[in-house]
Image: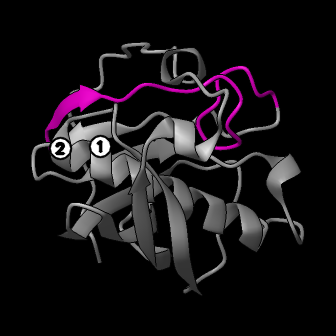
């Protein structure tokens, strides 16, 4: 699928923060179909049992896809919100140390709320985990009084990715 543009990364977010040595440092892309996608890999220190990623970190990636999918739909990284609810379905063990593909799609959007379907796949297109998220749109100052969007999301590092190829099974 064709990449339209790359989204910004934050400084310290556990999922996208480029200055967070323990995080995923995941890149996110706006896709031609209006979805958001990421190709990333969990690290060994993200494990629960050997060979498997901790469920909370799987859920954290699904959560990140909520806002990222909203940005992909509107192509507006100035719009923010917070998670109101999130359900996670663990379909198969999620491994660390291998490339994975995440996808978020807005299923419903109103002036105040967004509903998102988020999924994590292996490279062959097997669904490993998915979730449904409900977001409420909020001004960044309502989320954290001292937050500055431009200070928190400063990185736009182009990486030449123009296509993410995988076939959902």
Q: Nearer the viewer, residue 134 or 94?
A: 134
Q: Of the numbered discs in the image, which one, if any, rests on residue 30? A: none
User: In the image, residue 39 lies at what x, y percent?
Assistant: 45, 43
Image point 63% across, 68% down: which residue?
59
Q: Of the numbered discs in the image, which one, if any, rests on residue 71? A: 1
Image point 22% across, 27% down: which residue?
5
In this view, 18 is above or below 81: above
| Tag 1 secondary structure | helix
Part of the protein shown in magenta: 1-21
User: In the image, residue 121 lies at what x, y percent?
Assistant: 44, 66
Q: Nearer the viewer, residue 110 or 71?
A: 110
Could you tell me how far apart the alpha carbons at marks 1 and 2 are, in whole angstroms? Answer: 5 Å
Q: Which picture quadrant has residue 77?
A: top left
Relative to residue 146, is residue 148 drawn left or right?
Answer: left
Image point 24% across, 39% down: which residue?
30
User: In the image, residue 156 lies at what x, y percent?
Assistant: 42, 15
Image point 24% across, 44% down: which residue?
72
Task: For label 2, count other residues whose C-alpha is less than 10 Å away and answer few (under 14), some (14-19) or many (20+).
Answer: few
In this view, 83 is above or below 14: below
Q: Nearer the viewer, residue 62 or 38?
A: 62
| Tag 2 secondary structure | helix
> Which residue bears the numbered disc 2?
74
Q: Nearer the viewer, residue 163 or 68?
A: 68
User: In the image, residue 142 lies at what x, y percent?
Assistant: 55, 45
- Residue 93 visible in the shown view: yes
What quarter of the picture does the C terminus occupy? bottom left
């Amino acid at each position: 699928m064709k990449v339209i543009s790359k989204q910004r990364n934050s400084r310290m977010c556990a999922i996208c923060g480029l200055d967070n040595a323990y995080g995923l440092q995941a890149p996110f892309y706006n896709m031609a179909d209006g979805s958001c996608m990421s190709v990333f890999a969990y690290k060994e220190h993200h494990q629960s049992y050997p060979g498997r990623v901790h469920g909370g970190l799987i859920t954290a990636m699904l959560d990140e896809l909520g806002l990222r999918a909203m940005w992909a739909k509107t192509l507006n990284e100035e719009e923010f919100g917070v998670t109101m609810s999130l359900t996670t379905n663990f379909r198969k063990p999620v491994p660390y140390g291998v490339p994975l593909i995440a996808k978020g799609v807005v299923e419903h959007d109103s002036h105040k709320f967004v509903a998102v379907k988020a999924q994590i796949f292996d490279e062959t297109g097997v669904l490993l985990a998915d979730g449904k998220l409900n977001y409420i749109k909020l001004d960044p100052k309502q989320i954290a009084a001292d937050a500055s969007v431009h200070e928190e999301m400063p990185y736009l590092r182009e990486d030449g990715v123009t296509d993410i190829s995988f076939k959902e099974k």
